[in-house]
Amino acid sequence: MALSITKATVGGSEDTWGATTNTALDSIVSEINNNADGTNATTPNMTSLQIGGVAMTSTAAELNKLDGATVTTAEINILDGDTSATSTTVVDADRVVFNDAGTMKQVALSDIKTYINASAGSGSVTSVGVTVPTGLSVSPSTITTSGTFAISLASGYSIPTTSSQSNWNTAYGWGDHGSAGYLTSAPAPSSTQVGSATAGLALGAVGTYAFLGFSTQSTIVAGNTYVNGSVLKYSGFLSTTTYSDDTAASINGSIPSGTWRAMSNADNQSVRAASGLFLRIS
């Protein structure tokens, strides 16, 4: 309630003075008694309220916004633009203050992550180019809006397999081939060299030639391989009246051992067996 006090009139009668003073004192006592338990609201009417010499300029409505607030002083100070930072591990359950179309909310980082991931799948570029090492080619070399780079081997290049790469590494480990004295070409052997190389070879040894024939009628094909046995036998020319390189139908010569490669073609004729020049290869 508002407290109203009437001042006694100076110079008035004693009765008037006393009555007026008593009435004013009664009002003061009544006001104090009525508000002793804080149940009756009072409305102070003042031009300025000062605390420690500083005038309060906040309105009652502004101060009432803190009614029910549980915020701490440290939390309020964070909003003051403090530049210090505390190291923390950010997880989905963490919250940030978020302006949701004008309404301030605490939003979980998981919601923000979902939004960013959903929006990151599209976009365009102004110009992106790519370069590749020697041996590779790329097409197109530049993408201006969207597309796919295709990388392929340049002409004359290949990617080695695991096996061929292993062989290459082994050869590389042998050192500089240019200084190792490897043959890059070989001249034809001289007659002396051939004679020296074959002088010690026994009849029918690997690397020797022999004129062989089939003991039965057959055909010899140049380049084919024939295994020793009762079929191949040492032979010779028996015909003197015609130019024929075959032997009689029945060859009774000794049987050579090993595997031989035919160096000529020959066919049997009538009762005459085929024969020709052979090289023993094993």
Image: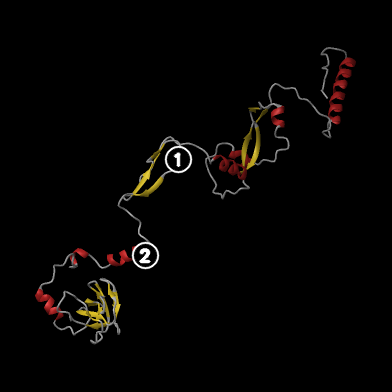
The answer to whether residue 92 is left or right of residue 224 is: right
Q: Position of residue 77 (x, y in %)?
A: 60, 39
Indicate the secondary structure of the residue bearing disc 1. Answer: loop
Would you name the residue on which mark 1 appears? 147
The answer to whether residue 2 is left or right of residue 84 is: right
Point 70% across, 34% down: residue: 66
Whichever of callouts 2 and 1 sits on the residue coming sooner in the sequence is 1
Point 32% across, 53% down: residue: 157
Q: CA distance from mark 2 to mark 1?
A: 36 Å
Q: Which mark is residue 163?
A: 2
Name the image quarter holding residue 169. bottom left
Quadrant for the C terminus in the image: bottom left
What amino acid is found at the position of numbered circle 1 in the picture?
Gly
Q: Position of residue 74 (x, y in %)?
A: 61, 42
What amino acid is found at the position of numbered circle 2 in the picture?
Ser
Name the image quarter holding residue 213. bottom left
Q: Are marks 2 and 1 in contact (CB under 8 Å)?
A: no
Name the one closer to the observer, 262 or 58: 262
Indicate the secondary structure of the residue bearing disc 2. Answer: helix
Quadrant for the N terminus in the image: top right
Which residue in the rendered view is the most extreme toward the left? 192
Task: Report crowding for label 1: few under 14, some 14 to 19, many 20 or more residues within 10 A (C-alpha).
Answer: few
